[in-house]
C-alpha cells in the first residue's frame, strides 16, 4: 500500500509538472505570435492571441493548432484613397497550420467581427462630411453643398451595405430636393460614398454589416487566413 501511495504521488507530481510545462509553452507561443501579428497588421496598437486546445505541445508537434482566438485593436493604416480604418477585429481561427520554423500560421477557416467607428467613416468620406448614428439601423450623414451660390448644410439618413468582400457603400435613402434636376446629384456627391475596409488579416472578408450606436459591426469570415506575413 505504501508503494502504491508513493506511485500515486509521483504520478500526480509528474502530471502537474507536465501541465505546468504545457501552459508555460502556450504562454510563450502566444507572446511570440502577438509580436509577429502586430508587425503584419499595419501597426495594431494592441494584439492579443489565445491558443485553445489541450495539450498544446502535442499540437505543436503536429504543426497544427485546433483553434486560435485573435483580437486586434487600434490599428493605424497608411493606405490612400477611400480606405476605411478598422478599429477592432475579433476572430476565431480554426485548424491553424504552422509553417516551417513556426514563422507563419494559416487558418483553414475563420469567423469573427470587425468594428468601424463613425470617426473612421467620417475620415473616409468627403472633406467636411460627418457620419454619425442616425437611429434604427441608419447612418446620419451631414455635409454642405452650394446651391445657387449659397452654402447649405444638409443631413440625410443613409443605408450602409456590403458591396463585396472588402467594400461598404453608404447611400442616402432620400435627399432634400430629390427629383429637382441637379440638386439631388449635388447632395449625393457629398453624402454617398464607398470605402474599402482596410486592416483585416489577409483572407478575412466582409459578410454582413449592421449599423449600431458604436459604429459598423461587420461579420467577417474567411478561409486560408494568414496570421502573419
Image (cartoon, rainbow, N blue to C red):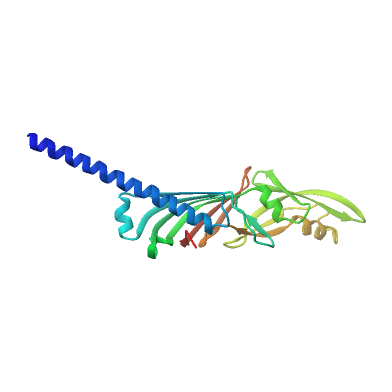
Occupied quadrant, residue 196 = bottom right
- Front residue of 127 and 166: 127
Image position of 167 with respect to 218: above or below: below
Residue sticking out furthest to the top = 2
Residue sticking out furthest to the left = 1
Image coords of residue 228 (percent x, y): 48, 60
Taking the spot 54% from the left edge, 60% from the top edge, the residue there is: 205
Looking at the figure, which quarter contains the N terminus? top left
Q: Is residue 41 left or right of residue 119?
A: left
Image coords of residue 210 (percent x, y): 60, 49
Q: Is residue 5 left or right of residue 212?
A: left
Q: Is residue 39 left or right of residue 26?
A: right
- Front residue of 210 and 220: 220
Q: Is residue 79 left or right of residue 7?
A: right
Taking the spot 33% from the left edge, 51% from the top edge, the residue there is: 56
- Front residue of 88 and 4: 4
Image coords of residue 121 (percent x, y): 68, 52
Amino acid at each position: 500500500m505504501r508503494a502504491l501511495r508513493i506511485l500515486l504521488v509521483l504520478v500526480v507530481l509528474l502530471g502537474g509538472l507536465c501541465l505546468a510545462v504545457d501552459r508555460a509553452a502556450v504562454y510563450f507561443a502566444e507572446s511570440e505570435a502577438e509580436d509577429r501579428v502586430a508587425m503584419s497588421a499595419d501597426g495594431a496598437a494592441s494584439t492579443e492571441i489565445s491558443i485553445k486546445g489541450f495539450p498544446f505541445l502535442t499540437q505543436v508537434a503536429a504543426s497544427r493548432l485546433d483553434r486560435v482566438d485573435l483580437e486586434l485593436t487600434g490599428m493605424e493604416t497608411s493606405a490612400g484613397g477611400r480606405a476605411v480604418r478598422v478599429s477592432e477585429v475579433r476572430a476565431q481561427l480554426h485548424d491553424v497550420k504552422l509553417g516551417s520554423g513556426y514563422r507563419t500560421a494559416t487558418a483553414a477557416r475563420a469567423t469573427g467581427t470587425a468594428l468601424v467607428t463613425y470617426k473612421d467613416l467620417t475620415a473616409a468620406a468627403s472633406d467636411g462630411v460627418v457620419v454619425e448614428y442616425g437611429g434604427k439601423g441608419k447612418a446620419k450623414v451631414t455635409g454642405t453643398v452650394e446651391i445657387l451660390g449659397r452654402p447649405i448644410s444638409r443631413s440625410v439618413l443613409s443605408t450602409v451595405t456590403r458591396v463585396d468582400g472588402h467594400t461598404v457603400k453608404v447611400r442616402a435613402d432620400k435627399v432634400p430636393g430629390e427629383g429637382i434636376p441637379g440638386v439631388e446629384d449635388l447632395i449625393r456627391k457629398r453624402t454617398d460614398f464607398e470605402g474599402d475596409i482596410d486592416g483585416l488579416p489577409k483572407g478575412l472578408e466582409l459578410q454582413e454589416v449592421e449599423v449600431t450606436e458604436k459604429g459598423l459591426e461587420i461579420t467577417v469570415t474567411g478561409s486560408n487566413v494568414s496570421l502573419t506575413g
